[in-house]
Image (cartoon, grey):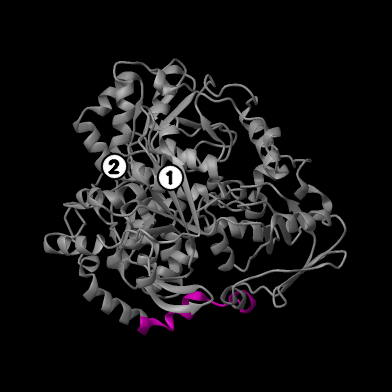
């Protein structure tokens, strides 16, 4: 997995609540083999005729390729599609800062080298207020966002997720080291709940 | 110590405590569909990893397949290609596959409960956010992305942070014309689309206990639309009666032994939740959405709210954008909004009771001129049962199209610019007849 250590650059303010994964990437774009970056946040970035939407902040030149996205509450709600994360990565985004996330989207972030940071709404708004003033820095090891004016905003992240992102760890490989424990659990469960394991095999 | 239903499932499934609130959690069942299965199984293939427990994994095409009457395997189409990929990868891994036209095929969240693949006390995952549907049977079920799906295929576990716990109690009897869909839309509108974020929700109270399993499946289905990872209903006699005799449910003594275990799962009476909400079910009206989020739901006899009534600026902007997208005026009544397409189906509302509810309204009437109306049964079983009792004839006679089971219009098929209103099957049927959103209680 792509490791995440430190990112420096613009932070694009997109503080709409409940931006769902359909907005992040449309289902029919997933299977078409198209350009993921072009399709990311498409209904916000482009008008129905395909031209860039001049009202969308992501189309301001200063936010082109911005590695940080400042987002609204419940960002990434909706479907479980993992390409919602990879589409944002394709757009150059490595870190999303929001008051809350769709649970599955957030889980998908950790598995793809995207850092989802939860901060209170007022904090996200304060960051957005500085978004046109210059570069931000997100430092995962230090668990700190630094604004253009030099304000340091600490953030919390579970140690497990922090380590996995910093090191770019492969979760499957890590878990397979516990294969014996999994086997032992299953053996005990077969005794305790045999019906879970004796699944009928009817002809249909 | 008093424990919740959620805790009674979560805790025994912890294979290893990973610290910091994280656990390696055993996955008792995984369901694969045509969009999620091929990439997850492909990932294992690429890494030369075996599926650890193929006997606990089941596969069914639903998302990309056509719901057109008389469909075939469609080898040249996307749906046909993905179906073929799922079938061949499942076969190579020893995973049971339910094919088109076969009993068992259907929307993954409809066929799982229907076949008895989902049981109380199980942990179950699937690569689709509406996997929370299965919690209606007292299982801990949630959606995952492809990476987590592959992790579970390879290890039969997931690395999970224990969510917080929330309870929503609906007390009292439902008014005529009000269904499970209205209850849950009411809850989402009242509490907000992010209310359950980071939580597992237990849906409880006398109104939930009085619901059939199909109604509970509708409620749990929309748990993710209130922001929750999972939704659960405590298993009870209704649950056991529903499961007894299902094709893949435990048989004979196994079933009775399981019931003894399942009776212990309900939350203890003094169990505590991080958040506890009560809703008066007697005051819930038929609901319909006016905007682009499920929280944009109002009673059918209400006026479209003015964005200015929202105190939070971001919520206000979202409401304004939603009204602009939907082409609606605040202050106007939502009833009377013209519609030109009606879809009765989806993992929320495509079960036999849903189709019966809609058919009862439609019988002897006609779909309004200019309206395209579809009924898409949730599964092959639902389709066959519906046909046995003549529902297909009732719908066809009224001008509906009776289609093949699958996700249909919910999966990218409405196209950009579509303006969608969510409502119960009865409300959707009423709208098809009137050509506009209307109050089902007036029919």
Q: Is residue A173 magenta?
A: yes
Instruction: Give the residues drawn in magenta, as a range.
Output: A164-181
Across and down, in percent, residue B148 comes to 47, 66
Provide the major secondary structure of the magenta segment. Answer: helix
Chain under numbered label 2: B
Across and down, in percent, residue A62 comes to 83, 54
Rendered view: B385 above or below B168 = above
Instruction: Tell me the residue at 51%/73% (across/down).
Output: B21
Viewer-closest of A95 and B414: A95
> Left or right of B65: which side holds A13?
right
> Left or right of A50: which side holds B258?
left
Q: How many marks?
A: 2
**Mark nearer the viewer, 1 or 2:** 2
Name the disc covering residue B26, or none. Answer: none
Q: Which one is earlier in the sequence, the residue at label 1 or at label 2?
A: 1
Inspect this view and state whether residue A64 appears. Answer: no
Can you identify the residue that label 2 sits on? B212
Disc 1 from disc 2: Cα separation: 38 Å
Can you tell which quarter of the image residue A150 is in? bottom right
Q: Secondary structure at mark 2?
A: loop
Viewer-closest of B305 and A130: B305
Can you identify the residue that label 1 sits on? B77
Q: Quadrant of the N terminus of chain A?
A: bottom right
* Contact flag, marks 1 and 2 (Cβ < 8 Å): no
Across and down, in percent, residue B418 comes to 56, 33
């Amino acid at each position: 997995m792509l490791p995440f250590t430190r990112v420096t650059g613009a932070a694009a303010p997109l503080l709409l609540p409940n931006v769902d994964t359909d907005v992040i990437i449309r289902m029919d774009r997933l299977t078409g083999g198209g350009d993921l970056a072009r399709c990311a946040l498409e209904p916000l970035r482009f008008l129905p005729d395909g031209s860039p939407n001049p009202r969308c902040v992501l189309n301001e030149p200063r936010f082109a390729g911005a590695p940080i996205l400042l987002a609204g509450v419940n960002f990434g709600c909706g479907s479980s599609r993992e390409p919602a994360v990879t589409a944002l990565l394709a757009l150059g985004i490595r870190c999303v800062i929001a008051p809350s996330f769709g649970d599955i989207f957030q889980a998908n972030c950790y598995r793809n080298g995207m850092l989802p940071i939860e901060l209170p709404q007022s904090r996200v708004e304060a960051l957005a207020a500085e978004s046109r003033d210059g570069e931000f820095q997100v430092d995962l090891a230090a668990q700190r966002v630094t604004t253009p004016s030099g304000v340091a905003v600490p953030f919390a992240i579970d140690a497990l997720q922090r380590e996995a992102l910093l090191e770019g760890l492969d979760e499957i490989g890590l878990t397979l080291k516990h294969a014996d424990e999994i086997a032992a659990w299953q053996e005990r469960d077969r005794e305790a709940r045999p019906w879970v394991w004796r699944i009928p095999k009817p002809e249909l | 110590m008093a424990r919740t239903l959620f805790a009674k499932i979560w805790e025994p499934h912890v294979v290893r405590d990973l610290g910091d609130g994280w656990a390696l959690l055993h996955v008792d069942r995984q369901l694969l569909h045509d969009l999620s299965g091929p990439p997850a199984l492909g990932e294992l293939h690429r890494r030369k990893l075996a599926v650890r427990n193929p006997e606990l994994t089941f596969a069914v095409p639903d998302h990309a397949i056509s719901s057109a009457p008389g469909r075939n395997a469609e080898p040249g189409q996307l749906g046909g290609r993905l179906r073929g990929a799922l079938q061949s990868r499942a076969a190579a891994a020893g995973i049971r596959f339910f094919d088109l036209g076969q009993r068992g095929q259907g929307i993954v969240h409809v066929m799982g409960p229907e076949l008895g693949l989902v049981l109380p006390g199980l942990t179950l995952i699937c690569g689709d956010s509406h996997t929370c549907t299965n919690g209606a049977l007292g299982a801990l079920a949630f959606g995952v992305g492809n990476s987590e799906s592959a992790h579970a295929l390879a290890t039969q576990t997931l690395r999970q942070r224990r969510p917080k716990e929330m309870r929503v109690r609906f007390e009292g009897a439902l008014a005529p014309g009000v269904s499970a869909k209205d209850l849950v839309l009411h809850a989402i509108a009242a509490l907000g689309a992010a209310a359950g974020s980071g939580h597992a929700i237990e849906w409880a109270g006398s109104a939930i206990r009085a619901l059939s399993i199909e109604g509970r499946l509708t409620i749990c289905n929309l748990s993710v639309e209130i922001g929750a990872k999972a939704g659960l209903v405590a298993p009870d006699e209704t649950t056991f009666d529903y499961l007894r005799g299902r094709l893949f449910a435990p048989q004979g003594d196994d079933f009775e032994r399981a019931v003894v275990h399942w009776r212990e799962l309900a939350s203890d009476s003094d169990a505590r939740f991080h958040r506890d909400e009560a809703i008066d079910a007697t005051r819930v009206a038929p609901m319909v959405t006016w905007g682009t989020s499920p929280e944009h739901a109002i009673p059918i006899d209400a006026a479209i709210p003015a964005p200015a009534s929202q105190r939070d600026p971001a919520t206000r902007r979202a409401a304004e954008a939603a009204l602009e997208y939907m082409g609606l005026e605040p202050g106007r009544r939502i009833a009377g909004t013209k519609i030109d397409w009606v879809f009765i189906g989806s993992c929320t509302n495509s079960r036999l009771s849903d189709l019966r509810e809609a058919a009862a309204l439609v019988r002897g009437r006609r779909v309004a001129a200019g309206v395209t109306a579809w009924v898409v049964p949730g599964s092959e079983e639902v389709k066959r049962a519906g046909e046995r009792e003549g529902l297909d004839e009732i719908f066809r006679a009224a001008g509906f199209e009776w289609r093949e089971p699958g996700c249909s219009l919910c999966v990218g098929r409405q196209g950009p610019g579509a303006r969608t209103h969510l409502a119960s099957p009865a409300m959707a049927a009423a709208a098809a007849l009137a050509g506009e959103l209307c109050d089902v209680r007036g029919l």
